[in-house]
Structures are given as C-alpha cells and as structure tokens.
Image (tube, rainbow, N blue to C red):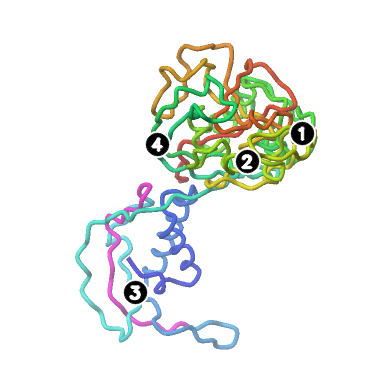
Amino acid sequence: MPRRTQLPKSLQPLARRNGIEVGYDPRFRADMNRLVKGLKGMLGQDVAAAPEAKKGNEKVVVVQQGPKYDLRGAQFAGGFAETVAGDQVGGTLNKPGGSKAEPPKPQPAVAKPQTPGPFTEDLGNGAMLDMVHIPARDFLMGSPENEAEREDSEGPRHRVQVPAFYMGKYPVTQAQWQAVAKLQQVKVELKLAPSRFKGNDLPVERVSWFEAVEFCQRLSRHTGNQYHLPSEAEWEYACRARTTTPFYFGETISTDQANYDGRYTYGNGKKGQFRKKTTPVGSFPANNFGLYDMHGNVWEWCQDHWHEDYDGAPQDGSPWIQGGDSDSRVVRGGSWFSYPRLCRSAYRNFLTPVFRNGSSGFRVVCSAPRILP
C-alpha cells in the first residue's frame, strides 16, 4: 500500500483516520470505498513526483514514473472495503529518481489491533446521539455485606463477565426522543412531548418501559444498528466503571456531583440542594467510562424482570428475563426525587412496565455498530 505522504493531500487525512479507527467507526466502509476509488483514479496514470507548479491560474503537474504496487487481497479490520486486483488498479506511485521497479510480491494482509472508540448517530432535526464504548471485562455485581444501607436484593454478590458494548453517553434527551418519535411506528404510539419538565437537553421522562422499547426499535430501523435497553448487569457494570465503592465518585455523594434530594445524606456526606426537577444531561462529572448522570436525575429502565435477589442470575451480562416477576421491570440509578442511598451503583428497584412518572427515563445500548456500505 502507498504511504500516507504519497497520497494526494485530499486523501491523506482520510487514510490516516482509517488507519487508526478502522473497524469501529460506522463511516469506515464508505471511507474505504472512497479511498480505493481515489487510488484507482490516481493510479490509472503516472503520478507526479515533483511538486505542483502554477502557470497563470492553472496547475501544472510534472509527471514521473515510479514503482507499481498491488492492492490484491487488501483486507481491513471490520471487513473488506473493496478487494481490488492488481491489474485493476495497476498504476504507479511517486519515487525519487523516477526509475521503474518490479512489482513487489503480494503479502498476506495482517489486521492491526484497533482501539474502539465512541461514535455518533444523526437522528435528524439536529438531534445527535453520542455512544460510548464500554470494554469487555468481568466485575463483581451487587454490594458487599458491609456497605451502608445495603438491601438484601443486592446480593449475593457474584462475578459477571460482560461482553463489550456501546451505551448512550447521557440519558435519552427530549430532543432525541422527539426526533425518534417522529419516525414510523413499529408497535406502540409515542407522544412527541411526554415529559413533565420541558427542555431539549433535559432527560425525557414520563416514559413507560414499553415506550422505551418502542424508541429502541424505531432507532434500530432508522440507523441499521441494533439498539435496546441495557441488561441490569450491563447497567451496573457501566455505572461502576471499574469502581467498587457505593458511588463511582467514592464512598459518598454530594449535590455537586449528582441531582438527587440533597436534604438527606449518605455516609459522611453533607446536605445539599434539592432541585425539585431534572437537570440538563451532562451537568455533573462523568464516570471513568465517560458516562454522565448514572447517579440521580432520572431512574433508568432495564430489560430485566424483577427478581428478589441474585440467586440464579446470569453470569454473562445477558438480561434476566426468565422467572421472577414478569409484571415488573428493573430500574436503576435513582432520580432527582430520590434519597442518596437509592442512587448507589448497586441499588435495585422495580416498576410495572406501563408506569410513567416525572422521574423515570432511560438510556440505550448498542451491541456493535454496523459497517456502512
């Protein structure tokens, strides 16, 4: 393959970005096809080694010959952007001296390790959805028996192996909700403005579990990615972000860190504000994964049925939808109206799936983004 510096300037940033983010950026395949198309056009004739010169208002290119190269079997992480035979693109690249060399022998393509990163979905109407990569790892789910104000439903503490996934950076906002609610209905009708507290950057609330699922289904059809509510294990793992303390901030919490009923305290914490309403998403510090508002603001729906404790719970991060109370769904994280103890990483609660109130919202999860054609 040509080096980045041998490409036209218009293609150099493209080649560099895909060299770093290949396989995890949903734009990858489209960019690769654009890159290959550009290479075809460039290599269909000898390419200038000398810099461009100007003649009047026109650019003059000095043409030199260089060694041919072969794209045969070029493979990129995340799939084949386009497999191109050498005789299809057989052009030349610049080389000082202009001498022609024999084509190199084809080498097997080796996929380089890639670091997954965040991506953004365009929902239309100016609404964007930021997704954060959550790496695969095992963690201890539940609370230790000596955690203050612990409840029996938070045990027994058990190890869970969670596969990698993507999670919404924030709870779903009212702007995002309205953009998706305008899309074609799958099963359930969605109101455009269900929330008690109004604001584009406020989390949507007064949304039932069934309506949150409908949102995910419409979003999946619109984007081509498979969106769903998090499993309870995914939610707790993402909230903890490699911490084992009651909150991802540490042993206690303050109203400078989250939106909850600050008239009450947890552990050695101090009293603070009771804002009596939701706050714009991202108003408080993120956790180590870059997720915001995992403590307080709005309760967040999970896929799981309610179970009284973790006896028999899955250990692979999947939703627990066998047995338990099928008329109740798990909610996590606490809200603006909650005592601080209810906002702990391990605290579990449940609501009926048709329930709506001004303190219940959700965020979405995506197992793996697609590669655009």
Pick whichever, 300 or 114, lies toward us.
300
Q: CA distance from mark 4 to mark 2?
A: 23 Å
Tell me the chief SS of the magenta region: loop
Which label lies toward us, 4 or 2?
4
Dot 3 corresponds to which residue?
93
Q: CA distance from mark 3 to mark 4?
A: 48 Å
Which label lies toward us, 4 or 1?
1
Which label lies toward us, 2 or 3?
2
Q: Quadrant of residue 363?
A: top right
Q: Which residues are magenta?
A: 61-80
Horizontal side of 125 relative to 37 (left or right) equals right
Dot 1 corresponds to which residue?
263
- Res 170 label: 2
Mark 4 or mark 1: name the one nearer the start of the chain: 4
The three-letter amino acid code for the residue at tag 1 is Arg
- Residue 324 at what x, y percent from top left? 50, 12
Mark 3 or mark 4: name the one nearer the start of the chain: 3
Residue 248 lies in magenta, yes or no?
no
SS for dot 4: strand
Which label lies toward us, 3 or 1?
1
Dot 4 corresponds to which residue?
138
Residue 78 lies in magenta, yes or no?
yes
